[in-house]
Image (cartoon, rainbow, N blue to C red):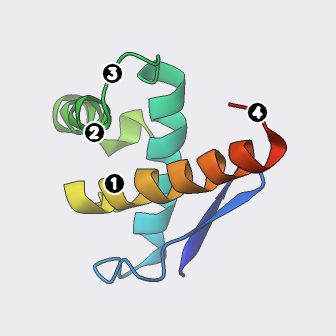
C-alpha cells in the first residue's frame, strides 16, 4: 500500500505518511485520471486543478470520480500524488528528449 500505477508508471507514495489505507490510494489514482480527462489543459495551475477536484467531490461526491470503494484523500495528499507523477513524467521526457 505505497504506490499506484498510472499508464504503466508507478507513483511511489511511501513517504506520504498520512495515507493509511488502500481506498485512499484507489481514490488518488482515480482523481489523477479524472483531472487529466476534465481539467488538465495546459492553462490551469496545479492549485486550480486540485481546487476543481475538491469542488467536484464536495458538490457531487467521490462517487462522481471513482467507481470503486474509495476514501477521500486530503488536499495535501492530492498535491503529493500529482507532484510525484509530474516529477516522473517530466524526468522521462527529459531522458527521451520529448517535452
Residue 46 visible here: yes
Residue 67 vs 12, above or below: the answer is above
Marks 4 and 3 sit apart, C-alpha to C-alpha, by: 21 Å
Residue 94 vs 45, above or below: the answer is below
Identified at 64% across, 47% down, the residue is 89
x, y (%) of residue 48? 24, 29
Q: Are marks 1 and 2 in contact (CB under 8 Å)?
A: yes
Q: Along the line of sight, which residue is nearer the eye, 53 or 88?
A: 88
Marks 4 and 2 sit apart, C-alpha to C-alpha, by: 26 Å
Q: Along the line of sight, which residue is nearer the eye, 50 or 45?
A: 45
Write down the quadrant of residue 16 in the picture. Answer: bottom left
Mark 3 or mark 1, which has the lower sequence index?
3
Marks 1 and 2 sit apart, C-alpha to C-alpha, by: 7 Å
The residue singled out by tag 1 in the image is 78
Q: Are marks 4 and 1 in contact (CB under 8 Å)?
A: no
The residue tagged with tag 3: helix, strand or loop?
Answer: loop
Residue 98's tag is 4
Q: Are marks 3 and 1 in contact (CB under 8 Å)?
A: no
x, y (%) of residue 97? 79, 38
The residue singled out by tag 2 in the image is 50
Q: Is residue 76 left or right of residue 11?
A: left
Q: Along the line of sight, which residue is nearer the eye, 84 or 54?
A: 84
Residue 74 visible here: no
Residue 13 vs 82, above or below: the answer is below
Mark 4 or mark 2, which has the lower sequence index?
2
Marks 4 and 1 sit apart, C-alpha to C-alpha, by: 26 Å
Foreground mark, 4 or 3, reads 4
Marks 3 and 2 sit apart, C-alpha to C-alpha, by: 10 Å
The residue singled out by tag 3 in the image is 44
Amino acid at each position: 500500500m505505497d504506490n499506484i500505477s498510472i499508464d504503466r508508471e508507478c507513483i511511489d507514495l511511501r513517504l506520504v505518511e498520512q495515507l493509511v489505507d488502500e481506498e485512499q490510494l484507489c481514490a488518488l489514482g482515480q482523481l489523477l485520471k479524472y483531472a487529466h480527462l476534465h481539467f488538465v489543459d495546459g492553462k490551469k495551475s496545479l492549485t486550480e486543478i486540485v481546487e476543481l477536484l475538491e469542488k467536484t467531490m464536495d458538490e457531487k461526491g467521490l462517487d462522481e470520480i471513482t467507481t470503486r470503494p474509495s476514501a477521500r484523500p486530503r488536499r495535501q495528499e492530492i498535491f503529493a500524488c500529482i507532484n510525484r507523477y509530474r516529477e516522473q513524467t517530466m524526468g522521462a521526457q527529459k531522458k527521451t528528449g520529448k517535452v
